[in-house]
Image (cartoon, rainbow, N blue to C red):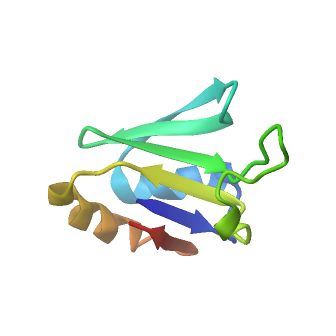
Amino acid sequence: MLFGSRDHSREALTALVASSTGAVFQPHDSSYWGVYECGEWNGVELKVLDNFEDQEGELLEPEFEQFPVLVLIDAPDDLAGELLGAFGRVDGLQRLRD
C-alpha cells in the first residue's frame, strides 16, 4: 500500500503514524532511498520517506508528485484493514494505492 501527505514533513508524519499505530521508527540512510524512517507494526515494515528525485531526476512516485512525503507498506490482507483504521486517524494522510 502507498499513502502520501501534502501537509507534513517526513519527521512530523513519522511521529503521527507512530502515535496512531504504536510503531517504533528508526532513521535509516540508504544509497537508494536516502534518509528515511523505518518502523514495524505487527511484523509489517513501514517506511516513511520523501518522494525524492533519483539520479536521473525522476521522482520515486511521479504520478503522485503533489505528495512530497510517502508511506510505503507491504501488509498482508489480514492486517490491511486494521492498518487502514489506524491510518484513518492521521490527518493529512491519503491512501494513494493498494
Task: From the viewer's side, name the closer residue of 81 and 22.
Answer: 81
Q: Establish if 37 lies above or below 59.
A: above
Specify the quadrant that holds the C terminus.
bottom left
Side of 79 relative to 19 (left or right): left
Q: Position of residue 25 (x, y in %)?
A: 48, 37
Side of 84 relative to 48 (left or right): left
Say which residue appears at 43% left-offset and 38% top-offset.
Answer: 39
- Residue at the left extreme, as displayed: 78
Q: Establish if 31 lies above or below 92.
A: above
Task: From the viewer's side, name the closer residue of 40 and 31.
Answer: 31
- Residue at the front extreme, as displayed: 56
Say which residue appears at 83% left-offset and 42% top-offset.
Answer: 56
Labels in figure, total: 0
Specify the quadrant that holds the N terminus.
bottom left
Q: Position of residue 68 (x, y in %)?
A: 72, 61
In the figure, residue 8 lies in which quadrant? bottom right
Say which residue appears at 66% left-offset and 26% top-offset.
Answer: 29
Task: From the viewer's side, name the closer residue of 46 and 9.
Answer: 46
In the figure, residue 42 lies in which quadrant? top left
Q: Position of residue 33 (x, y in %)?
A: 65, 35
Q: Position of residue 21 (x, y in %)?
A: 35, 54
In the figure, residue 19 lies in which quadrant? bottom left
Side of 48 relative to 53 (left or right): left
